[in-house]
Amino acid sequence: MKKLGSSQRSDVWADGDRIIKHVIGDQQAFEREVTALRLAEHTGMVPRVLDVDPDTRTVVMERLPSHPFDEDWVIDYARGLARLHQATGPEHAGTLPRQQVPDPEPFLRFVRALEVEVGDAEAELAFADTGRFDLLHGDPCPGNDMYTESGARFVDLEGAMLGDGLTELVYLRMGFPTCATVSETPKELREAAERAYFEERGWSEPLEDACVRWLVQGDALVQRAERDGTDHLARVVDEDWFWYSTTARGRLMFRARVVAGFTETHPAMSALARRLLERMNRIWEPQPIDTRRTHIS
C-alpha cells in the first residue's frame, strides 16, 4: 500500500484499484462521509464504497482515475456539482445534518468595530432556510475534485450536509471560501460554468444572496479544524493570519469586492460592502488573490 497525502483529519492509502481512508477521531465526520457516498453513488460523482469498518472509522472506496485538469476545468466542476446536488431531495431529510443559516450579528459587530456605517443593510441580511435538500459536498475545494474523461468527480465528503446547492456553486464567485487556496475565476469561464450548472439542473436562479451569505461567515476565514465557535470576525479586527494562499483580511477584502457589485439586487448591502472595502483598504495592507488555480503540495 502507498500512503497518500491527506489532511490531519485522516490517513489515506492507495492499494491497487482501492483507496483506504481512516478518519481520525471524528465519528460524525466518518458517518457523514459514508452516508454521503452512499446517497450519491447512483450519480457517478463520487467513488463507490466497497467496505466499511465503523469500529475503526475506516472506509474502502474505489480508486478513481485522475487526469490533469484543463484551463476550463470550472465548467466540469460546476456540472459535477449540479449532479452531486441532485442526488437527494426532501425524502432524505434527517439522513445528514441540515445546512445552517448564517447569523449576521458577528458580521454587523465587525462592521461597527471598523467604524463603518451599517445603513439599511440589515434588512438584506435577514437570511432564511431556502428549503432545498441538495446533497452538499461541504468543502468542494481544489484538491477534493478529480477529473476523468467523463468530467469531474468529488472526494472527501466529511462535511457533507443537506441544503442549498447554490451556496457551493458560488464558490466560483467568492474565491472558494472554505478552501486553503483562494482564486478568482475569470468572468467568461465563471459565467460558462454557472450556465452549465443550471443547464444540468433545468432551472436558473440569481446567485447574489448565496454570495452575501459567504461574506458574513467568520468560519470561512479559517481551516476546518479551527471552526470551533470562535468569532473570527472579531479576531480579524485586531490581527491577521495567513492561511495557505492569502490572509484572513485578504479573503474578506476579496469577498467584499464581489458583493460591492450587487447594486441591482442588494443595493443596501452593496453600498455597505463598498464602504467596508474602502475602510479596509485604508487601514489594512491589500493582499493578492490568485487568478489561476493553485496546486496544494
Image: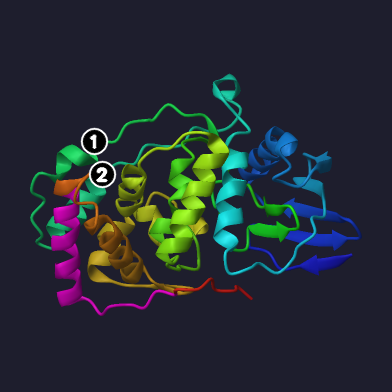
- Taking the spot 62% from the left edge, 44% from the top edge, the residue there is 29
Residue 34 picture location, percent across and down = 71, 39
Q: Which residues are magenta?
A: 269-290
At label 1, the amino acid type is Ala
User: Which x, y percent locates residue 28?
Assistant: 61, 40
In the image, is residue 280 part of the stretch drawn in magenta?
yes
Residue labelled with disc 2: 104
Mark 2 burial class by Cα count in 10 Å: few <14, some 14-19, many 20+? some
Q: Position of residue 164 (x, y in %)?
A: 46, 36
- Nearer to the camera, 53 or 121: 121
Residue ID at (32%, 72%): 240
Looking at the image, is 46 positioned above or below residue 224? above
In the image shown, does 191 or 180 lie closer to the viewer?
A: 191
Q: Tell me what residue is drawn at x 42 percent, y 26 percent.
A: 131
- Whether residue 190 is in magenta: the answer is no
| In front of the other: 155 or 248 | 155
- In the shown orientation, is residue 38 left or right of residue 165? right
Q: Could you tell me which quadrant the C terminus lies in? A: bottom right
Predominant SS of the magenta segment? helix
